[in-house]
Image (cartoon, rainbow, N blue to C red):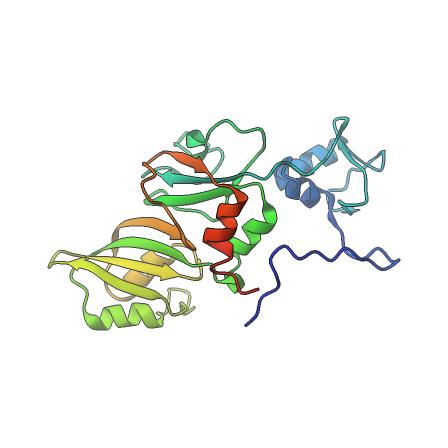
Amino acid sequence: MRHKKFYSKEKSRTPERRGGHGLARVLSKLGIVSRSEAGQWIRAGRVKVNHRVVRDPEHRTWVEEDVIEWDGKIARSQVKIYLVLNKPLDVITTAQDPEGRTTVYQFLPKLSVRVFPVGRLDANTTGLLFFTNDTELGEVLTNHEYGIPKTYEVKARGKLSEDQIKRLRSGVKLDKGAFTQPCQCHILKTNEASTWLEMTLKEGKNRQIRKMLEAVGSEVSKLRRVAIGNLEIGDLKVGETRQLTRREVDEYILRQNVVK
């Protein structure tokens, strides 16, 4: 299957002004504010399109043609940020938590633009978490059609048999009846109490690896993401971040993995 070329843009438009996006989505894609917050701004009358206040978050807007203002400022595309975090244990992937738990945003450096996590890692999963304000890249990394591989180190309870490993590789049936796609699964080390695996998936169902191990009669005791595409966590320490260049994103994630 051949996928659409990354970042291809169709700039022509018929006189009927096809295309465009809802105003809240446009503000989010520009990296100015989250889509839900944008909706609040719009309904409060803080946003203008072509010098007129618009109160409908779904108002059809063309970012390349319309003049968009918020609080008197012209909305422009923000500088693109690409950031990776080695997520610690017991940290949740959200901006705020009503229960006061530690969130991944507490480990990020102070930035001039809003970034969002591309995909999530649950509280009990550690390792590589990618942040950006580049919504198009976020779509590529999370859309299973592009097949960007994610690699994990997994500690499973018990000594897994060859049959269990074969089932993990070929795909298993999950709790709601869906089958997982074939994946790479290799034993790193094993003993009677546990089996360390390296698993590489090209899809990202909720808690997928944990459910896959349960489906073959085991369970995950430790789970760590170590790579997205060919971008590896390397020697990045737990709780530390580093910024990537666009060249690194192209080289380690996109060029090697996306079919253009």
Residue depicted at 32% across the width and 56% down the height: 210
User: In the shown orientation, is residue 16 left or right of residue 164?
Assistant: right
Quadrant containing the C terminus is bottom right
Q: Position of residue 191 (x, y in %)?
A: 12, 58
Q: Position of residue 93 (x, y in %)?
A: 44, 40
Quadrant containing the N terminus is bottom right
Residue most extreme to the right: 15
Residue depicted at 27% across the width and 72% down the height: 166
Question: Which residue is more in the foreground, 260 or 228?
Answer: 260
Q: Position of residue 126 (x, y in %)?
A: 33, 44
86 relative to 179, above or below: above
Residue depicted at 32% across the width and 36% down the height: 237
User: In the shown orientation, is residue 188 left or right of residue 245?
Assistant: left
230 relative to 80, above or below: below
Q: How many marks?
A: 0
Q: Position of residue 203 (x, y in %)?
A: 44, 61
93 relative to 260, above or below: above
Question: Which residue is more in the foreground, 40 or 225?
Answer: 225
User: In the shown orientation, is residue 192 left or right of residue 240?
Assistant: left
Where, by quadrant of the figure, is residue 140 drawn?
bottom right
